[in-house]
Amino acid sequence: MGVTTTEPDEATAPARTGRWLRPLGWASLVANVVLVVTGGAVRLTSSGLGCPTWPRCHGGSFTPHGAYSINAAIEFGNRTLTFVLAAVAVATLVAAWRSGRCDLRRLALVMALGIPAQAVIGGITVLTDLNPWIVSFHLLCSLAIIGVAVLFLHRLDRPAPVTAARGPVPGLAWATFAAAWVVLYVGTVVTGSGPHAGDLHAPRNGLDPLQLSQLHADVVFLFVGMTVGLLFLLLATRAPALAVRSVALLLALEVGQGAIGFVQYFTNLPIVLVGFHMLGAALISASVTHTLLQVREPAAS
């Protein structure tokens, strides 16, 4: 009787992913969070047009020349970070390809393609003199790549299940995830109407900052309320501890982010607080993705 050979099951794939996949996955996540923070520094220091052309920085040069200004240095530093991101993304793609897992290959490819896409969007942002709608899209793309990096790390240990979980708990998790992205998007529109344009002469979107701030506060309250509801629902259904901790961490980030926003409102948006707000947005995009995954695909007890 012959021996039948089969392809390795994806459930055993974590042992075959290689020692570099996890560090590279974390490097991708951290590097993209850093990109959001440095992008915030560009905007908050009015350095968005420190390099007034793209892909070159100034005239025919790819680097600042002549008398270096702090604005040109900050903008050029943010552009240079793209090469670090590209190197990490390519290394992650190579490692994922060698692992033999199609799911990791797809996710690594998305992250790798996201880097040049972001560079092009950044170029359009400069060429349109920091159009606020393009700037918003630039930030949202970075936040989306952060979410993909979290999914990549999750898939290292848990390949996608054959059937997706259904019911009120996963449904509320999806709704909370959607609310988070509404909050993030409205937040970029609020910024596009406010004082931090990235350059003293950059256009604003023309919308009322006070009305938009109120709308943003309303959707934040909805987001927080849904997160609290999800936490209590998980506790009531005796969900795995890791899922409960994920939601609790998300709620803590929301409260911290809300506190920063509240102080900003009464202190005329000091630059340091806006920078922390940008970091908070990146962390929430990562945390809400992690929460959704833990609720939909809980680890076995």
Image (cartoon, rainbow, N blue to C red):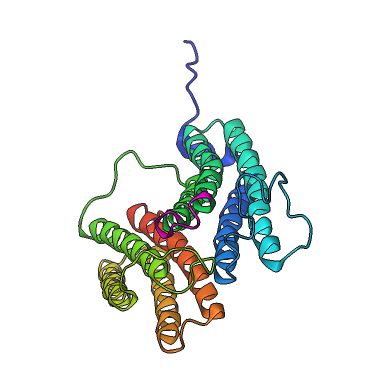
Quadrant location of residue 261? bottom left
Residue beneath the point at 42% across and 69% down: 191
Residue beneath the point at 53% across and 69% down: 200
Quadrant location of residue 131? bottom left
For the view shown, which residue lies furthest in the left direction?
A: 168
Whole-percent x, y for residue 169 in the image:
25, 60
Q: Which residues are magenta?
A: 127-134
For the view shown, which residue lies furthest in the top direction?
A: 1
Closer to the camera, 53 or 167?
Answer: 53
Whole-percent x, y for residue 262 in the image:
40, 84
Closer to the camera, 60 or 14?
Answer: 60
Residue beneath the point at 34% across and 58% down: 295
Q: How many marks?
A: 0
Q: Is residue 128 magenta?
A: yes
For the view shown, which residue lies furthest in the right direction?
A: 66
Residue beneath the point at 58% across and 49% down: 25
Regarding residue 267, the answer to whether it shows in the image is: yes
